[in-house]
Amino acid sequence: MKGQKGYAIVSAGRLKSRRPTEILRALGRQFARWWQLAEQRRRLAMLDDAALKDLGLSRADVIQESERSFWDDPLVR
């Protein structure tokens, strides 16, 4: 198409095979992050209403957040 400027470029670095130790480290980091998310959501769900008010959260917000899956990471886009 005329005027079309962009197209997808696949980075060659991402396609290279990684060493098994690097893969295991990446998996370990991912599992640690998932554990951290699950623990934070459990602790958030245990807060009382006064603490939630201090944080500016409602009980509905906490329920919605605590029902998210552990792999649902808000920092990953």
Image (tube, rainbow, N blue to C red):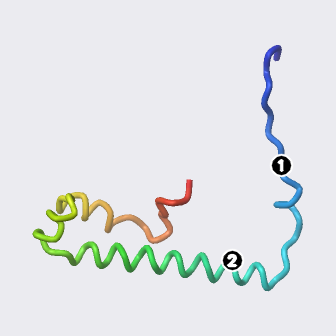
Which residue is the site of mark 1?
10
The residue positioned 66% from the left and 79% from the top of the image is 27
Q: Is residue 67 above or below residue 32?
A: above
Quarter occupied by residue 41: bottom left
Numbered label tally: 2
Distance between the Cα atoms at labels 1 and 2?
Answer: 21 Å
- Seen from the viewer's position, the closer of residues 6 and 71 is 6
Q: Quadrant of residue 36?
A: bottom left
Q: Is residue 33 above or below residue 53?
A: below
Kind of residue at badge 1 = Val
Left or right for 63, reference 35 = left
Side of 27 relative to 6 (left or right): left
Q: Residue at x 89, y 56 (%)?
A: 12
Residue type at the position of mark 2: Ala
Q: Which residue lies at the image location 83% right of the left edge and 49% below the top edge?
A: 10
Would you place residue 50 above or below residue 60 in this image? below
Q: Label 2, on which residue?
A: 26
